[in-house]
Amino acid sequence: MSDSAGMPPRRVVGFCGPSGVGKTTLVEQLVALLKARGLRVSVIKHAHKRFDIDHPGKDSHRHREAGATEVLIASAHRLALLREFDQEGMPTVHELLAELSPCDWVLVEGYKHAALPKVEVWRGALNQAPLYPDDPHVVAVATDAPAGLPQATARPVFDLATPEALASWLMDTADRFTYHPEIHG
């Protein structure tokens, strides 16, 4: 089965948990591990605050400040699209997935309430309530304390110290992460 572009289906998995638990580090490790297997991997990252990847004085910043809705910056090595919204509002993860080029995997950091299969990153030392007992979209837990989870779970539990095990599980169970825009979007 392939998507409309004739590409193999895209796999999508989210990573959720409170700030400071290590989601970014885990996603970074998984990107490298999946890429080492010859896969194309993209990342969607939720930003909680106003952010800017552009800086005053740069041409692209000047164009945005002048009122451009979109500024596309391209070189021989990368492309960046800056889009201003007329009204404040966060795009859904499904809208963002539609913006991406074809790839094998998309790792979504944040978007903890999205209806996507997710891996919860949980650290015992933070004494925060886990999401997995009440969120049916959490399909696995990655933690620094596998034996110390506050509630037992039948979901797979992975040690943050061995991201290779999580990468292997993602590959072994890849079909469960197939993204269907007509269903999810």
Image: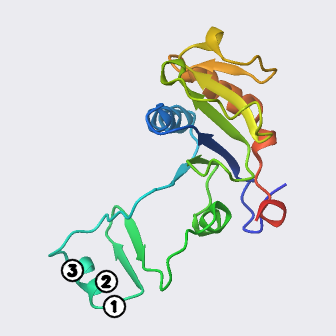
21 left or right of 136 in image: left
131 or 66: nearer the viewer: 131
Residue 47, percent across and down? 45, 56
156 or 148: nearer the viewer: 148
Please report the residue visible at 60 percent of the width from the left and 40 percent of the height from the top: 15
The quadrant in which the C terminus is found is bottom right
Please report the residue visible at 57 percent of the width from the left and 33 percent of the height from the top: 37
Disc 2 on helix, strand or loop?
helix
Q: Are marks 1 and 2 in contact (CB under 8 Å)?
A: yes
Residue 45, compared with residue 26, is above or below; it is below
Q: How crowded is mark 1: few (under 14 residues within 10 Å), some or many (20 or more)?
A: few
Q: Which amino acid does label 2 sit on?
A: Arg
Q: On residue 64, which mark appears?
A: 2
Q: Name the residue under label 1.
A: 67
Q: Which amino acid does label 1 sit on?
A: Gly
Please report the residue visible at 56 percent of the width from the left and 36 percent of the height from the top: 34
Measure the alpha-carbon separation of dots 1 and 3.
13 Å
